[in-house]
Image (spheres, rainbow, N blue to C red):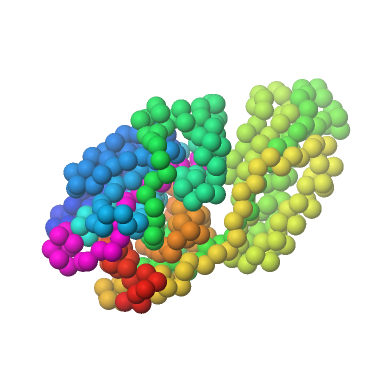
Amino acid sequence: MGASHPEPNPTNFTGQDALFIEDFAVLCTFGATEDGGVDRQAGTPADGQQRAWFSQLLRQNDFHVEFDHVGNQFGLKEFVPGAPYVVVGSHLDSQPTAGRYDGAYGVLAAAHAAFRLVEEVEQGLRSPRYNLAVVNWFNEEGSRFQPSMMGSSVYTGKLPLEKALETTDAAGITVRDALETIGCLGTGQGPEAAFAAEIHIEQGRGMERAGVTIGVVDSNWAANKYGFRVHGEQAHTGSTLIEDRKDALLGASMLVVAARQIADAHPGVVHTSVGQLKVYPNSPVVVPSQVELLLDLRSADEEVLAQADAELHAHLAKIEKAANVRIEKFFSHCWPVTPYQIEGVELAEKSAADLGLSNSRVKTLAGHDSTNMKDIVPTVMLFVPSVEGISHNTREFTRDEDLIAGVSMLTETVGRLLEGALAEDKPVL
């Protein structure tokens, strides 16, 4: 694929499907980049603009809009006064140089699925036992503020609210200030969830290769994420003898290589990466005195992940000695392998079969807000294919027909959750 993408073409579709494609085309304009991607990191003006547009879309369809105390955006539809909600959605924030689909598709698909379900309820085709909430989770990507999945982590009680609000970006701006600036710092804890659902692009090549339209996620990979600070000493890059140097960047580089060597030692079973380096003083004629980096290890096998983690930590002392530096761990964010509730997986499979959509069980290697939600309520996670598996890249692409199939799938699945298919006093349909 080249850098350009086919533009959404609503004339290929009719009715509700055409409306979805039209709205997606509008959503793609917020924070649009010249090469067909988007840049709308959490709490930025572009994020504020898309949130304002999304609020308007929800209100036009008779949903009540509110923001909670960490900026999660909810569109609420009450069918049964006092009942908890089926919470469905994803995230609108992006990486600095990102594709159009990651997260954003899941939010807009949730909204359109909700609009369709309201019509079905009004036509007497659905009998809801729960209320419905469309959600745009705050700062899922974690590019501007760490950690990732911040909004859903606060909502699920995994991250203290004040710690999240006081988190700063590289410029020293807090989450609280960023949310206030874009008018999205609300109050309260958001609606009470009974069930949750999320649809997302796969971000891998498996479904495309298998010719599968819907992926039903049955588990996530475990992940260990660390922040390391390598301490050295400033020196002149020209005159200081090599043997006298305490080069923090050299030590950090050795950590980057060590992470890749660990992945190579466990091919296909362990993924590792270093996605960010902060070098100080970052001058061309100064040996760096400090480097911060974020490093992660992921695997579906917790025993293998523990082994890889031990290998990583064994490298630290060796690197400290070889580069004459000191390595400090200042951050860790880890989660285990946890399955999605089997009753939700089976419900999704039944929904796909009834719609005539090819499907298979898949695992998610990436973290998603649903991986937090499934720890507090039964949760369904769905994927649609990604062309060539490209993601976190402006060339990210999913075909319109797959987007539409995903909306239909989400509508049916959430509709069954709404009617109580997974309620304790009612068997799965």
Is residue 60 visible in the rendered structure shown here?
yes
Seen in the picture, residue 332 relative to 123 is either above or below; the reply is above
Picture coordinates of residue 327 (x, y %)?
76, 40
- Whether the magenta-drawn stretch holds residue 353 is answered as no
Q: Say which of 95 and 56 sits in front.
A: 56
Does 284 sit left or right of 145 as displayed?
right
Picture coordinates of residue 80 (x, y %)?
26, 58
Does 288 sit left or right of 400 as displayed?
right
Picture coordinates of residue 34 (x, y %)?
35, 37
Q: Say which of 180 and 245 sits in front.
A: 180
Seen in the picture, residue 355 relative to 204 is either above or below; the reply is below
Q: Residue at x 70, y 37 (%)?
A: 229
Q: Residue at x 62, y 43 (%)?
A: 294
Seen in the picture, residue 357 relative to 408 is either above or below; the reply is below
User: Which quadrant, please, contains the N terminus?
Assistant: bottom left
Seen in the picture, residue 340 relative to 320 is either above or below; the reply is below
Q: Which residues are magenta?
A: 119-143
Is residue 109 visible in the rendered structure shown here?
no
Q: Residue furthest front?
A: 82
Q: Say which of 305 and 187 sits in front.
A: 187
Residue 73 occupies which quadrant of the picture?
top left
Q: Residue at x 42, y 63 (%)?
A: 379
- Whether the magenta-drawn stretch holds residue 140 is answered as yes
Number of residue marks? 0
Picture coordinates of residue 387 (x, y %)?
38, 59
Q: Residue at x 39, y 27 (%)?
A: 181
User: Which quadrant, please, contains the C terminus?
Assistant: bottom left
